[in-house]
Image (tube, rainbow, N blue to C red):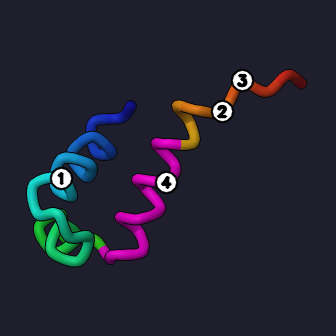
């Protein structure tokens, strides 16, 4: 997991609110949500074969 995604996750856990966490991280709330979703999907999705 990339450091900025981990920082985003920690901010959400700390604030227990996406809007406040986004303000702390100085990003938009939708961007924060996408970051959390993408980090979760990368952990649970099997690798793709080409």
Q: Position of residue 35 (x, y in %)?
A: 42, 55
**Residue 38 lies within the magenta run:** yes
- Distance CA(mark 4)–CA(mark 2): 12 Å
- The one of 41 and 7 positioned closer to us in this rendering: 41
Disc 4: CA contacts within 10 A as few (<14), some (14-19) or many (>=20): few
34 vs 16, left or right, is right
Q: Are marks 1 and 2 in contact (CB under 8 Å)?
A: no
On screen, 25 above or below 19?
above
Q: CA distance from mark 4 to mark 1?
A: 14 Å
Q: Which residue is mark 3?
A: 47
Asked if the residues shown at circle 3 and circle 2 are in contact, with their CB atoms under 8 angstroms apart, the answer is yes
Q: Position of residue 28 (x, y in %)?
A: 32, 76
CA gap between label 3 and label 4 equals 17 Å
Dot 1 or dot 2: first in sequence order is 1
Displayed quadrant of residue 18 = bottom left
Q: Is residue 34 magenta?
A: yes
Q: Say which residue label 1 marks.
A: 13
Which structural element holds mark 1?
A: helix
Q: Earlier in the sequence, mark 4 or mark 1?
A: 1
Whole-angstrom CA distance, mark 3 to mark 2, is 6 Å
What secondary structure prevails in the magenta region? helix
The single residue placed furthest to the right in the displayed view is 50
The N terminus lies in which quarter of the figure? Answer: top left
| x 66%, y 33%: residue | 45
Q: Are marks 4 and 1 in contact (CB under 8 Å)?
A: no
Nearer-the-camera pick, 41 or 16 = 16
**Above or below 48: residue 37:** below
Q: Are marks 3 and 4 in contact (CB under 8 Å)?
A: no
Q: Which residue matches tag 4?
A: 37
Residue 37 placement, left or right of 33: right
Neighbour tally class for label 2: few under 14, some 14-19, many 20 plus, Cα within 10 Å: few
Residue interval drawn in magenta = 28-40
């Amino acid at each position: 997991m990339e450091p900025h995604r981990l920082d985003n996750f920690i901010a959400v856990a700390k604030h227990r609110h996406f809007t406040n966490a986004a303000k702390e991280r100085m990003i938009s709330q939708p961007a924060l949500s996408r970051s959390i979703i993408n980090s979760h999907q990368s952990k649970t999705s099997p690798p793709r074969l080409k």
